[in-house]
Image (cartoon, grey):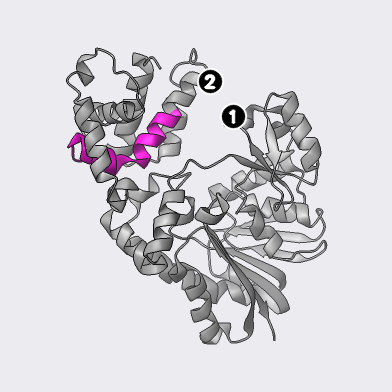
Amino acid sequence: MRLHRNLVFATIDALSDIFNEGKYADKVIANALKRDKRWGSRDRSFIAETTYDIVRWKRLYAEIAEVKEPFSRENLFRLFAVWATLRGIELPDWKQIEDTPTRRIKGKFDSLSQIRKYRESIPDWLDELGVQELGEELWTKEIHALNNTAPVVVRANSLKTTKESLKEELQKENIETHPLKAYPEALELNERANVFRTKAFQDGFFEVQDASSQQVAHFLEVEPGMRVVDTCAGAGGKSLHLAALMENKGQIIALDIYGNKLKELKRRAKRAGAHNIETREIDTTKVIKKLYNSADRVLIDAPCSGLGVLSRNPDAKWKLQPEFIDRIKATQSEILDSYSKIVKSGGKMVYATCSVLPSENQEQVEKFLAREEGKNFRLIKDQKLLSSETGYDGFYMALLEKTS
């Protein structure tokens, strides 16, 4: 592979924004890719994939390169030189990366790869927490799986098409996919591609949604005609799936504390042809209280550490702090206590997270059932989805029924 100066410099600029300015990797990369209209898909892929790679392996590469944060421009070029060397890419004769000790890089990589926190490139505290919660053996497998690049999976929108028809439509646009047997609406791309530019996407035939995430709406056991409340709807990926499963019949009330996310949900719902979704911003506690004892089904897709989706958000490893995990667990408890009151007698509720930590998952459910607020609920079933077992995001889902 021949390295092109303008692509490498764009990558260095992106890394500076992510590491030194604390900006989100996905937004930084999206902006970086707009810099030069002459760049083709391979050029944009190089910038995106290289930036994500160096973000993912920051701790390992920084240790090999002997650099510390905040990273100077010279430091960032050293990280890049480590990345290129480990991929067997011949370094050009540029002053920014001259004198790169390629042999020493390989030797240091081999020795550091014996130590999990360097090999998997994670902070000490996160490694300790993973072992504490999952045990040495399972944590080793799980964090390794979460360092793989996430596959691109789409969910066929059954309001407008079928999985088989969507496969054919995408094929016409030179995007090859294969169906996933255990997932009724899922197609996985054979190769990464910008699916948002396709006519099939613009026509609302699909949404990009990880295979694990697609299981949540099914877990809620919705039926056409029900009243369903999605309490932490965000931009609405699961609300849209629920609308499709309900065949646009009944009512979905999508709640969120962020009004801008609900605006995005409305836009997506229009494209998807989902007409039974009503959005409500949670700007006061009255919004929740008005819904008490009224819903057949309630989805709590709770805010969480996001450890199950590190493969698609590798910068989260560096933004997460132990204090945040403590705070988010307190928030999860409060949300369970409050939003569970929306379920009517005989109704059901799903508590879900994209975390792999038992303390955010089954332990939260156990504590809820032991509290006054959970005394009228029983656990029907729960499911742990580990990335090391599925190849997709780490998720947890618990289905509870209100008995009286």
Residue 376 x, y percent position in the rendering: 63, 86
Q: Residue at x 75, y 64 (%)?
A: 222
Residue 53 part of the magenta segment: yes
Relative vertical location of residue 183 with respect to residue 323 in this rendering, above or below = above
State if disc 2 and disc 1 touch (CB < 8 Å): yes
Q: Amino acid at mark 1?
A: Asn
Secondary structure type for disc 1 = loop
Relative vertical location of residue 150 with respect to residue 76 in this rendering, above or below = below
Badge 1 is on which residue? Answer: 194
Would you call the spot at circle 1 few (<14 residues within 10 Å), some (14-19), or many (20 or more)?
A: few
Q: Would you say the magenta stretch is mainly helix, strand or loop?
A: helix
The total of numbered circles placed on residues is: 2
State the residue in front, 382 or 296.
382
Would you call the spot at circle 2 few (<14 residues within 10 Å), some (14-19), or many (20 or more)?
A: few
Q: Residue at x 52, y 79 (%)?
A: 366
On-image quarter of the N terminus: top left
Answer with left or right where residue 271 lies relative to residue 16: right
Relative vertical location of residue 21 with respect to residue 140 in this rendering, above or below = above
On-image quarter of the C terminus: bottom right
Q: Residue at x 26, y 56 (%)?
A: 124
Return the disc, 1 or 2, that comes first in the chain's sequence. Answer: 2
Badge 2 is on which residue? Answer: 41
**3D distance between C-alphas at marks 1 and 2:** 9 Å
Answer with left or right where residue 56 lies relative to residue 265: left
State the residue in front, 216 or 84.
84
Instruction: Inspect this view and state whether residue 276 appears.
Output: no
Answer with left or right where residue 20 lies relative to residue 48: left
Residue 241 x, y percent position in the rendering: 70, 52
Residue 343 x, y percent position in the rendering: 67, 75
Secondary structure type for disc 2 = helix
Residue 358 x, y percent position in the rendering: 46, 69
Region rendered in magenta: 48-70
